[in-house]
Every structure is written in C-alpha cells, then in structure tokens.
Image (cartoon, rainbow, N blue to C red):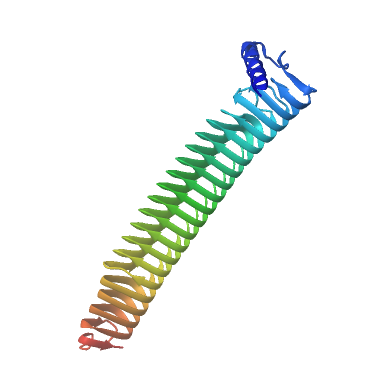
C-alpha cells in the first residue's frame, strides 16, 4: 500500500510540472492500465472508462466510472462525466451520477444525480436529483428533485420537488412541490404546493396550495387554498379558500371562502363566504355570507347575516345586527340601537331596536 501511495504522489507531481504543456492533446504523462481507454488511468486522458485520476481536466470528451479531479479548467465545457466525480471543483459539460465537490460543482449544461458541494453548485441548464450546497445553488434552467442550500437557491425557469433555502428561494417561472425559505420566496409565474417564507412570499401570477409567510404574501393574479400571513395577504385578482392574516386581506376583484384578518378585509368587486375582522370589512361591490366585524361594514349590496358596529349599504338583503344600521334599500331585518331603511315609508325609516321591510 505504501508503494502504491508513493506511486500516485509521483504521478501527481509529474502532472503539476507538465500543466503548462497540456494543450488539446493528452499530457505526456497521461496513461492507462491496461490501455489508455479502459482500466486505471492517470493524467488528462480525454476518453476513459474505469478509475481515472487527474490534476486538472481539460478538453475531455467522456469519462465513465470514477473520475477524481482536483481542480477545474474553463476549457472543459464539452466533457461528459458519468459515474462518480470527486474533486475540489469538478466541472464538465454534463455531470451524471454521484458528484462531490469539496468547494463546488459546476456544469456548462446539466448536473444529474446525487450532487454535494461544500460551497456552491451551479449549472447552465438543469440540476436534477438530490442536490446539497453549503452556501448557494443555482441553475439557468430547472431545478428538479430535492435541493438544499445553506443560503439561497435560484433557477432561471422552474423548480419542482422539495426545495429548501436557508435565506431565499427564487424562480424565474414556476415553483411546484414543497418549498421552504428562511427569509424570502419568489416566483416569476406560479407557486403550487406547500410553500413557507420566513418573511415574505410573492408570485407574478398565481399561488395555489398551503402557503405561510411571516410578514407578507402576495400574487399578481390569484391566491387559492390555505393561506397564512403574519401581516397581510393580497391578490391582484381573486382570493379563495381559507385566508388568515395578522392585519389585512385584500383582493383586486374577489375574496371568497373563509377570511380572518386582525384589522380589515377588502375587495374591489365581491366578498363571499365567512369574514371575520376587527376594524373593517369593505367591498366596492357585493358582500354575501356571514360577516363579523366590531367596526365598519361597507358594501354596495349585502346579502346574508352580518354582525357589526356600523353597517352601511346601498342594499341590504338578510339580517343585519349592529349598533347602527344604515341602508338605502332593506329586504330583511335590521337589529340595533338605531336603524335606517330608505325604502320604508316616511315616518318609519328610522327605528330603534328593530326595523323590517
């Protein structure tokens, strides 16, 4: 064993002295046992199957088996390595199999399989499989499978699978699966599945599934499913499902389902379902269902059962229980200290305790 170790050290030293002489041809010290194509190889063998040991890969075509490379060279972007790739920064056009980098892993195209890097891991196109990086992990294309990074993860297009980022996670397009970010989480298009953002979460289009954000959560279009936020939830168009926010919930068009907010709930066109807030529930259009707000309830048209401090509507259909009720058109019952129904006869529009039309 000692003789073998000394032999390997001698080979490495010979390679180090010959690195400057390595061009497009194989190093003069590159050889394989029993051949330069198969077996055990030493040096910059461009195409080899078996166990290969080299200081720096350059202009490699394809390696199948175990490839041990101690450093990265920028002129190795066409290489394909299949099997076990080990080194400080293993790099190739495509890395397939088990890839382990003491500092990092990089691929001009893709990295596939079990991928572990001490600091960073990156590919120009896709990263597929189980990928773990001490600091950052990034892909110009997709990240698929299980991906974990100590600080952040980013992809140019989609993320699919189980994604965990110590600080942030960001995707140029969709995020699908289970994703957890210590601080922020964002997608250029959609977020679908189970998503947790320590501080905030945002999607350019839709958010669907079970989502939780420590502070704020927003989508350019729709949010649907079970949604929690420490401060606010907002959607450019529609909110549906169950929404719970520490302060406010708002939809550009509709809010539907069960909505619970510490302060207020609002929508541009319609609120529908069960709404609970402390200060205000307001829609520029309709509200229907059951509304509970000790403060202010405001809608153009209301249909259902409401409990509020002050209810003001253009049209009220159902039962409104409030300290003060005011509506231009009543189709139902008002219960409160003072009640106004504009469509009752003169002299019976204002009533204490109970008003009926």
Q: In this view, does 202 lie to the left or right of 5?
A: left
Residue 220 drawn above or below residue 345: above
Q: How many labels does the image show?
A: 0
Name, please, the residue furthest toward the right: 35
Q: Which residue is drawn at 52% across and 48% down?
A: 163
Q: Which residue is drawn at 56% across and 35% down?
A: 122
Name, please, the residue furthest toward the front: 2
Relative image position of residue 140 (x, y in whole percent): 57, 38
Relative image position of residue 276 (x, y in whole percent): 33, 70
Q: Is residue 107 visible?
A: yes
Query: Which is nearer the eye, 129 or 249?
Result: 129
Image-quadrant location for residue 22: top right
Relative image position of residue 297 (x, y in whole percent): 29, 71
Image-quadrant location for residue 324: bottom left
Relative image position of residue 67 (x, y in whole percent): 67, 29
Q: Which residue is drawn at 27% across and 84% down?
A: 334
Image-quadrant location for residue 277: bottom left
Q: In this view, does 216 lie to the left or right of 79?
A: left
- Looking at the figure, which quarter contains the C terminus? bottom left
Query: Which is nearer the eye, 272 or 6?
Result: 6
- Looking at the figure, which quarter contains the N terminus? top right
Q: Is residue 140 visible?
A: no
Q: Residue at x 38, y 73 (%)?
A: 274
């Amino acid at each position: 064993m000692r003789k073998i170790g000394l032999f390997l050290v001698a080979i490495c030293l010979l390679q180090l002295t010959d690195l400057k002489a390595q061009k497009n041809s194989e190093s003069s010290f590159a050889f394989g046992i029993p051949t330069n194509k198969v077996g055990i190889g030493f040096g910059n063998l461009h195409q080899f199957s078996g166990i290969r040991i080299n200081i720096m890969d350059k202009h490699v075509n394809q390696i199948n088996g175990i490839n041990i490379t101690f450093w990265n060279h920028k002129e190795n972007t066409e290489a394909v390595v299949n099997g076990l790739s080990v080194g400080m920064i293993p790099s190739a056009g495509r890395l397939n199999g088990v890839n382990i980098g003491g500092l990092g892993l990089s691929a001009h195209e893709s990295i596939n399989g079990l991928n572990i890097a001490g600091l960073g891991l990156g590919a120009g196109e896709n990263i597929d499989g189980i990928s773990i990086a001490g600091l950052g992990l990034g892909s110009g294309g997709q990240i698929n499978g299980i991906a974990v990074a100590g600080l952040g993860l980013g992809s140019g297009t989609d993320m699919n699978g189980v994604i965990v980022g110590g600080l942030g996670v960001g995707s140029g397009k969709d995020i699908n699966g289970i994703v957890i970010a210590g601080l922020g989480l964002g997608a250029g298009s959609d977020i679908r599945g189970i998503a947790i953002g320590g501080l905030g979460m945002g999607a350019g289009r839709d958010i669907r599934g079970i989502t939780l954000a420590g502070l704020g959560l927003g989508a350019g279009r729709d949010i649907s499913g079970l949604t929690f936020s420490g401060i606010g939830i907002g959607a450019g168009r529609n909110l549906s499902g169950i929404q719970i926010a520490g302060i406010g919930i708002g939809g550009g068009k509709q809010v539907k389902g069960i909505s619970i907010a510490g302060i207020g709930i609002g929508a541009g066109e319609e609120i529908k379902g069960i709404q609970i807030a402390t200060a205000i529930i307001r829609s520029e259009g309709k509200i229907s269902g059951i509304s509970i707000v000790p403060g202010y309830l405001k809608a153009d048209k209301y249909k259902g059962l409401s409990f509020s401090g002050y209810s003001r509507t253009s049209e009220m259909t159902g039962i409104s229980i409030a300290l003060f009720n005011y509506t231009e058109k009543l189709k139902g019952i008002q219960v409160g200290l003072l009640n106004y129904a504009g469509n009752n006869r003169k002299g019976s529009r204002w009533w204490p305790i109970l008003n009926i039309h």
